[in-house]
Image (cartoon, grey):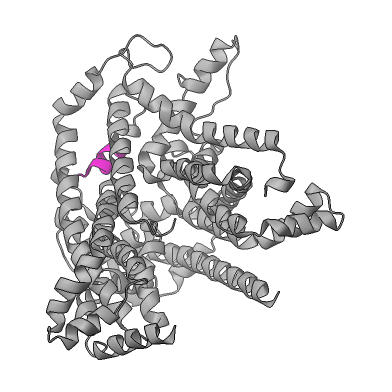
Amino acid sequence: MRSIANPRLMLMILSAVFAFLYIPISVLFALSFNEGGLPTAWTGFSVKWYGALFRNSDIMGAALNTLVVAVISTALATILGTLLAVGVEIRRRKGRFLETIIFAPMIIPDIVLAIALLSFFSLLNVTLGLHTVILSHVVFNLAFVCSVVRSRLKTFDWSVVEASTDLGAPMVVTLWRVVLPVMMPAVIAGALLAFTLSLDEFIIAFFTAGAGRDSITLPMQIFAMIRFGVTPEINALAAIVMTLSVVILALSQRLNRGGLPGQ
Amino acid sequence: MHWRIAPQIQARRMIDRKPLYLMTPALAWLTAFMVAPCLMILALAFFQRGIYGGIDYTFTLENIALVFDPLYANIFLKSAFIAGLSATIAVVIGYAAAFAITAAPAKRQAMLLFFAVLPFWSNYLVRTYAWIVMLNREGLIAGAAQWLGYDGELPKMLYTETAVVIGLVYNYLPFVILACYAPLSRLNPEIAEASRDLGGNGWTTFRRVILPMTVPGIATGFVFVFVLSIGNFVTPALLGGGQFQMIGNLVYAQFLTANDWPFGAALSMFLIAIMMGLLTLQTYASERASGARREE
């Protein structure tokens, strides 16, 4: 595109877009270190708002809940999603219906899945709580794990499976000792992706966690807090949450050079 | 290459017999916690609301009819307008950014793209909150105006429709940049040169050659932003401050406050229909575009 592009105009566009993307985030980070906590005046560098965060038992409780949800749903989704990916890739015939079912959790709007699950659990008289959040998070997490692992398997040389089978290994052994090691980076990348998605997920958790105080996740806590406006404590919390997901996803991206799904 | 492909096919055939036991757990999970609940929502839309807010299992079309009630139809139109506006702005900015990235030296493109997408990886709530910090009365923009010597009353920025549109554009822009970058980066640079040699200036080349060839990226970006915006309830709730309702907020209210589940289900049914229609259209558009490319 260089031949028809005006370099000065291109530079202006890039500067404007990156300013738009990064100024709000940078302001947030800067304010979280502002002693006075107000956006209008810089009164000195301080980490006291981070300290306040760790003494806030509501926030710590919510963080713990989120961790429980993310760890368990990621573990389940990684197992189910990986098995699904291998199963789908082994099949030679690709069914359109099957593809749709597997792809659906990634494109269904959160609010639709959220209300569907809320009605489902309620009409079946299932008590809502962290366990229902976990059940729900596995749905989209397993789809993302499956997608990451499948992209890895696309370049997999299946003749090594034949070799292993020829040498007398049962299918389970072949999968465990031949296929899994090849897939491992993608499995870990998928798990990391699922973990961050679960950490950050708000809408489905909001609908399926029920009304109890003890099943509030961190995004739910953040939502409740920011409805009441700007506080320096939220700035600090926002900075931590933001850094955490970016670091984990960068790690996932590094492991899986094929790229994340949807990107 | 036949000698390489043949054993692979053979190997797959050998283990083809039982891929089912690998897929069953995940498919069972998806059936139980996605397919069944979604089908239930469809069914729910055709039942009556119980007197005490529960569900009365009598068939009715009232909920569907109520969606077309001017009060609610207007909210649908309003949401579609906000979503359409956000998607248009996001596509214009995103396309320009993607174009500027492809015009950068090849070595720098990957890095630019990485930093364009990076914000997308962080928490949606936090990114929306960043705009509360920017737009509120004691926020950064107000502070900057004051610092520049502006003393008058600033127009209200937070809790307006504009704030909602800004929030939606901000949140989904990285995706649009990615969607537009893909077809732009695949373009053969010789095409632009050919157009030049044939007498087209830069703008003509862009409008008549480059733009038509990158429609799939634009369509993908637009549909993505539209679909995610029209059902959004977080951004209107936080940046719109409950001043006006969008479909997402309406659905939310039916389920969590008004307790009229059948109507909420009917609303979501229409929401899903709009989204599916658009996604199908987008798939069709990109398939047609790739078909056209093959014919060339």
Task: Reply above or below: A141 against B171.
Answer: below
Mainly helix, strand or loop, the magenta region? helix
> In terms of image quadrants, where is residue B127?
top left
Q: Which residues are magenta?
A: A216-223
Magenta run includes residue A76: no
Q: Is residue A248 left or right of residue B60?
A: left
Res. A63 visible in picture = yes
Q: Find residue A16 and report its horizontal and vertical position in percent.
A: 59, 33
Q: Is residue B267 left or right of residue B291?
A: left
Q: Is residue A222 magenta?
A: yes
Count the labels in the image: 0
* A134 shown above or below A249: below
Q: Quadrant of residue B148?
A: top right
- Rendered position, A71 above or below B68: above
- Using residue B104 as the reference point, say whether residue B270 is left or right of it: left
Across and down, in percent, residue A122 comes to 22, 63
* Residue under the image location 50 percent in, 58 percent down: B227
Q: Residue at x 54, y 11 (%)?
A: B147
Furthest residue to the right?
A: B199
Q: Nearer the viewer, residue A232 or A168?
A: A168
Indicate the position of residue A51 as horizontal and vertical percent values: 19, 22
Answer left or right for B48 relative to B230.
left
Please state, as top left, top right, bottom left or bottom right, where the C terminus of chain A lies in the image. Answer: bottom left
> In front here: B115 or B170?
B115
Q: Name which residue lies at 20% across and 69% down.
A: A180
Tell me where residue A258 appears, x and y as whole percent. Answer: 39, 59
Residue B44, visible in the rendered structure = no
